[in-house]
Amino acid sequence: MIEGVSEDGHTESTEHEIDDRDDIKDESKERATNSLKRIKETERTLHIGQDRPIRISAGHRLRHHTGKCSRPHGHNYEVTVSIQGTLTDCGWVVDKGEVTSLINEWDHRFLLERGDPLVEAFEQTGDGDAVVVLEHPPTAEVMSVALERRLKEKLPETVSAIAVEVRETSELCAGHGGI
């Protein structure tokens, strides 16, 4: 049938014209898919907390230190994160909320080195869940490494590099040095 108006007033098309439109739609979808694939293969870096760091309050002690840091005390830490990787189906490197949640697991916790007698003391008082046990002394340097490893373990495989910076005070900041 040639395109025309049917008895009920609707426009009618030939089967050939409909097939042509379907081909155009398929080509358009293919171009969009290829474009998205090229974008997703591009590595990008997501910076979280550069202007407004992720803030966590945590206690710690350096039990082998001879100075005042051997006593339990705390800091209001500021954490920034840079994550490099290819884009996910959502169009981002990672979900910022997931990164923030993982770091916030340390908020209002006590960071202790494995073997510190305070770990057992917390457990005996029923506050074992308030402790994060690290393999090394809980310095800002160790914290940045531990957070990088935790994020690498939990984030998608599309992530290729992670750099975490932990600011303990206005004078002390430790991290990877950037990606």
Image (tube, helix red, strand yellow):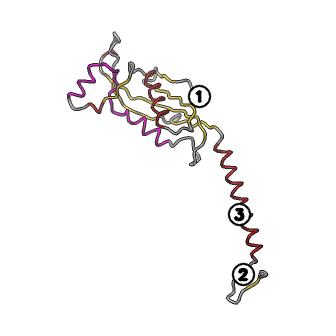
Residue 169: x and y in percent read: 43, 23
Q: Which residue is mark 1?
A: 179
Q: Is residue 149 left or right of residue 23?
A: left
| Quadrant containing the N terminus in the rendered view | bottom right
Q: Name the outermost residue toward the bottom.
A: 7
Q: Which residue is mark 3?
A: 25
The picture places residue 40, in percent across and down from the top left corner, at: 63, 44
Q: Amino acid at mark 2?
A: Thr
Q: Residue furthest right?
A: 2
Nearer to me, 41 or 171: 41
The mark nearer the N terminus, 1 or 2, is 2
Mark closer to the observer (1, 2): 2
Three-letter residue code for mark 1: Ile
| Residue at x 71% of width, y 87% of height | 6
Q: Distance from label 3 to label 2 (Cα)?
A: 20 Å
User: Mark on residue 11?
Assistant: 2
- Judging from the image, what secondary structure is the residue with disc 3 in? helix
Q: Quadrant of the C terminus?
A: top right
Q: CA distance from mark 1 to mark 2?
A: 59 Å
> Which dot, 1 or 3, sits closer to the camera?
3
User: Between disc 3 and disc 2, whose residue precedes?
Assistant: 2
User: Mark 3 belongs to which amino acid?
Assistant: Lys
Whether residue 102 appears in magenta in the rendering, the answer is yes
Start-end of magenta stretch: 96-124
